[in-house]
Image (spheres, rainbow, N blue to C red):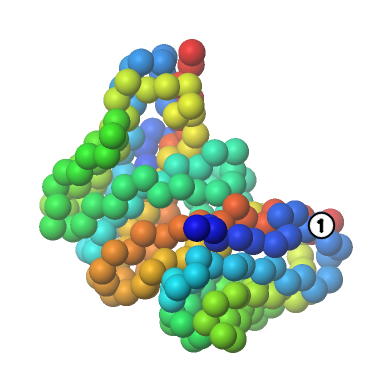
């Protein structure tokens, strides 16, 4: 199965620093999405990147996709304490149905 | 507009009991997804509806789990003879369409199920 795998599993940084999280997957995808989750409930969609795109930006977020390496990265610049959350990547297969989440990266931003 | 809502927010039941979890998707969203999330893990896909029909139920762990969406809007996840291992947060999501196009999923807050 195509399983998104994030690394690191946990990341702790100081406020103002940049945070980079990586995601790897196994098979061909239609798109890859990043989500944030606070307190184990309610995932919030951050950004979607399609298989024919290489980079997307949204505010302080920058996502890259390398389909040859089957990997993606999420960069959060100038982090804030409010960015503390778990971040998940999820891949959608080419049939647009199979949506698989990775185990997530727990980000802690220390004030 | 209103987001995805799920009821109840918390459900405590005893082993062997039957439970129903409800999901109200965003109005006009044709695709609806159910996931299960255990502590410290990512959401695990259970079932996906396109309209009224289950387009993919390959994630349902066994025949104790069943879901319906009779009118293509509200969905109910039903669990029979609950087991302690069913304890998790059950998440529902909806999207404007499920196949091709823009597939952003909007998640509800989840139902935390505890089986004693």
User: Is residue B62 visible to us here?
Assistant: no
Pick whichever, B91 or A57, lies toward us.
A57
| Mark 1 Cα shell of 10 Å, populated few (<14), some (14-19), many (≥20) | few
For image coordinates 16% across by 43% down, the residue present is A55
Horizontal relation, residue B64 to residue A1: left or right:
right
User: Is residue B15 visible to us here?
Assistant: yes
For image coordinates 71% across by 55% down, the residue present is B9
Residue B73 lies, in percent from the top left, at 55, 77
Horizontal relation, residue B44 to residue B86: left or right:
left
**What subunit carries mark 1?**
B
Horizontal relation, residue B66 to residue A90: left or right:
right
Pick whichever, B17 or A33, lies toward us.
A33
Where disc 1 sits, the SS reads strand
Q: Give the residue at mark 1.
A: B12
Pick whichever, B16 or B25, lies toward us.
B25
Rendered position, B86 above or below A63: below
Rendered position, A76 above or below B13: above
Rendered position, A38 above or below A43: above
Rendered position, A19 above or below A69: above
Q: Name the quadrant of the N terminus of chain A.
A: bottom left
């Amino acid at each position: 199965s195509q399983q998104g795998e994030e690394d690191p599993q946990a990341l702790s940084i100081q406020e103002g620093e940049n945070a980079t999280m990586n995601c790897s997957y196994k098979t061909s995808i239609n798109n890859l999405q990043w989500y944030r989750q606070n307190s184990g409930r309610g995932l919030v969609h951050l950004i979607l990147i399609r298989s024919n795109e290489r980079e997307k930006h949204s505010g302080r977020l920058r996502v890259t996709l390398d389909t040859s390496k089957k990997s993606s990265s999420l960069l959060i610049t100038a982090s804030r304490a409010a960015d503390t959350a778990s971040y998940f990547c999820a891949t959608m297969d080419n049939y647009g149905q199979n949506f698989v989440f990775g185990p997530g990266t727990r980000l802690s931003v220390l004030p | 507009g209103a987001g995805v809502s799920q009821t109840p927010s918390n459900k405590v039941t005893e082993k062997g009991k039957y439970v129903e979890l409800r999901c109200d998707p965003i109005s006009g969203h044709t695709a609806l997804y159910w996931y299960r999330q255990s502590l410290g893990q990512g959401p695990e896909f259970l079932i996906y509806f396109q309209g009224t029909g289950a387009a993919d139920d390959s994630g349902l762990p066994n025949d104790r789990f069943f879901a319906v969406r009779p009118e293509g809007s509200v969905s109910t996840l039903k669990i029979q003879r609950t087991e302690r291992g069913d304890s998790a947060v059950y998440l529902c999501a909806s999207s404007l369409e499920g196949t091709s196009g823009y597939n952003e999923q909007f998640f509800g807050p989840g139902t935390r199920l505890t089986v004693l």
